[in-house]
Image (tube, helix red, strand yellow):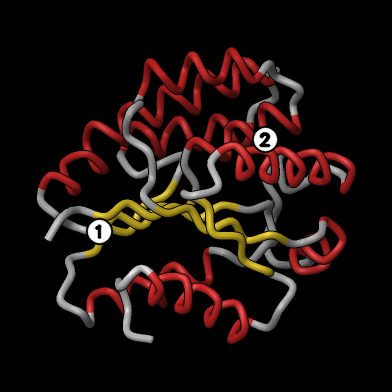
Amino acid sequence: MSGLFISFEGIDGAGKSTHIESLAQALEATGRIVVRTREPGGTPLAERLRQILLNEPMDAMSEALIAFAARRNHVEHIIRPALQRHEVVLSDRFTDATFAYQGGGGGLDEDFLSILEQWVHLPLQPDITFWFDVSPEVAAERLKGARLPDKFESQPQEYFAKVRAAYAARMASDASRFVPIDAHQSPQGVWEQVQTALAKRGLLAA
């Protein structure tokens, strides 16, 4: 039984976080040990960097450098050790988010982000990435009154349209890793898509 790394991606308001716990419980029911984590974050240092990244004004390059610094700590102290123990890692976001937010939303050069990706964690990538795709309009409606928004959640819909397009481009470049999820559906409909994708891979019962 080998380790398994699954990431969950999507714009704010896509509803991905709702299904991480459901998947964790389903995998635990099969006997797997599951590590739940998130980015930015996952370690004490990365969580402190998360607060800076989500709340302090800065340019896109500074955001990317902080995100990758947090990611390096996260990979070395949480993700890689768990995979070496043959556990399952479920991460709410990983590097695709930086390409989407700082690249697509912030206009940062993709080649620069690819260099950082190479230095920080390649060849490690998620085995499966669920991309919860939803329109910026629907996502914004879901976020209304949910909580005090951070600086990214406060961005206009035009920003999230760019982020969404960057996710689509990222998926096109690595289609075998990505599983697109129609996040416009009901929570049950979304969960059924996740279950079906994993059942096809023999990771959950159909």
Q: How far apart are the alpha carbons under marks 1 and 2?
A: 26 Å
Out of 37 and 162, give the one closest to the viewer: 162
Q: Which residue is mark 2?
A: 101
Q: Residues within 10 Å of mark 1 (few under 14, many from 20)?
A: many
Residue 124 in the figure: left or right of residue 54: left
Residue 26 point in image, percent of width and height: 32, 79
Q: Is the N terminus in the top left, top right, bottom left or bottom right quadrant?
A: bottom left
Marks 1, 2: nearer the viewer: 1
Q: Amino acid at mark 2?
A: Tyr
- Labels in figure, total: 2
Residue 56 in the figure: left or right of residue 199: right
Residue 40 point in image, percent of width and height: 47, 39
Label 1 secondary element? strand
Label 2 secondary element? helix
Q: Residues within 10 Å of mark 2 (few under 14, many from 20)?
A: many
Mark earlier in primary sequence (1, 2): 1
Residue at the spot 36% in from the left edge and 50% down from the top edge: 127
Q: Amino acid at mark 1?
A: Val
Residue 198 point in image, percent of width and height: 40, 71
State the image quarter where residue 182 is shown: bottom right
Out of 136 and 150, give the one closest to the viewer: 136
Residue at the spot 69% in from the left edge and 61% down from the top edge: 13
Out of 4 and 91, give the one closest to the viewer: 4
Q: Which residue is mark 1?
A: 88
Residue at the spot 83% in from the left edge and 45% down from the top edge: 161
Residue at the spot 52% in from the left edge and 58% down from the top edge: 130
State the image quarter where residue 98 is shown: top right
